[in-house]
Image (cartoon, rainbow, N blue to C red):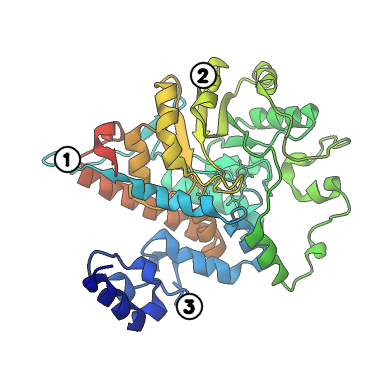
Amino acid sequence: MSMHRRRLLQWLAASPFAATASAQLLPKSRLPDPIPWAALEPDKLIKSPKDAINVFDFEPVARQNVPPAHFGYMASGIDDEVTLRANREGFLKFQLRPRRLVDVEKVDMSTEILGVRYATPIMVAPVGGHRMFHPDGELATARGAKAGGHAMILSTATTTSVEEVSAARGAPVWYQLYATNKWDVAKAFVMRAEKAGCPVVAVTVDRSGGRNQETLFRLQRTDTRDCNTCHDRSSLQANLRRRSMYEGVDLTGLTHTQASSMTWDFLKRLRDTTKMKIVLKGILAHEDATLAVQNGMDGIIVSNHGARSEDSGRSTIDALPEILEAVKGRMPVLVDSGFRRGTDIAKALCMGAQAVCIGRPYIWGLGAFGQPGVERVLELLRIELHAIMQQLGAPSIKQLVPAMVRRA
Ligand SMILES: Cc1cc2nc3c(=O)[nH]c(=O)nc-3n(C[C@H](O)[C@H](O)[C@H](O)COP(=O)(O)O)c2cc1C
């Protein structure tokens, strides 16, 4: 170790900043860095959505408002949460290559996704049980999404009906399917979503095994409320009674809400059952992307479920290039997991992703302030995307091209 570096480390250890900001935040190459002077202080909470400088400002407010067990459910990854960190750190593996002297006075962020034009390529990812985070639940989210023209994917585990959510969004939402172990249950969900006008069913294919959500279990222990007053755990069927999609469906024989035995045969059967477009959510390997094309799927979402499926250690931005290469433009490729900044979104769009779905950040907004929180989180992401599009010299989504991103 050089003398200079040793002195630097000694300075850091003795510095008052070491107590307030993790030394890891300080770059090794230079000092000073602005972060220690303006670190996000979790005890100084924003009082209104407009005070937020970035999406992270909402998380500590949500933490304060939402019961610890529910907050833990949202925040948790799996095991050592290596993938959760990788999803953020993955963006550091890629750099943007801005182009200059392009007229970017006007920026058009609208884009077509599966035949429908949306005002923005930023979509609302399916998250179960929004009433866990705010009494207005999915209706607040849908109204927040509507304000910015965002497409919304509604979870099978929704606490509000697909009909009401679509009405609040002002257009039918996409429907996310957890297939369960029983075909007739999946079929009932899909028929209802189709009847409600949903144009797309996003079949989640990445929840085939168990998971140890350690952060959830630890925070659950700190929750002093009696969970049994809301959750009927006497049986799976009783537990699902508060979930709108299961209403009126024969749940006899239901043992799982997700599906461990799902194969491509299920998708063939689904194709014969519905006219909705079918998108697979949770694809991470190019082999499966190729199979999705061969099996006539309409699109895929590259996702590791926000690091909630397996602790693979791989970010989705790292997996995206191999998927795009396999698909070769034959169907739209969407992506989610860990997207928090306009630059994150721009990197994926430059690579060739059609849209980017956001999970936890809008839930932070919802838990913090309800609909205005969701609205502001999505607005901040749009503002950041707009700014980086101008900086990159890309006045439209189509002009975000692979040459604008490189592996670091
Ligand atoms: C609290 C929570 C609940 C979720 N519920 C579902 C769900 O019901 N169905 C689904 O397909 N994905 C679900 N997801 C995964 C999201 O759709 C999405 O893939 C993920 O949140 C994206 O990562 P991010 O949270 O880092 O943005 C959930 C994620 C969270 C955080």
Label 2 and label 3: CA atoms lie apart by: 49 Å
Check disc 2 and report its element: helix, strand or loop: helix
| Pick the front one: 13 or 106 | 13
Q: Does residue 85 sit above or below 357 in this rendering?
A: below
Q: Does residue 313 sit above or below 175 in this rendering?
A: below
| Label 1 crowd (10 A; few <14 / some 14-19 / many >=20) | few
Locate residue 274, reporting x and y percent.
65, 21
Residue identified by numbered label 2: 293
Check disc 3 and report its element: helix, strand or loop: loop
Amino acid type at mark 2: Val
The answer to whether mark 3 is within 8 Å of ligand 1 is: no
Label 1 and label 2: CA atoms lie apart by: 34 Å
For the N terminus, the quadrant is bottom left
Residue identified by numbered label 3: 43
Q: Earlier in the sequence, mark 1 or mark 2?
A: 1
The residue at 67%/46% (across/down) is: 158
Residue identified by numbered label 1: 99
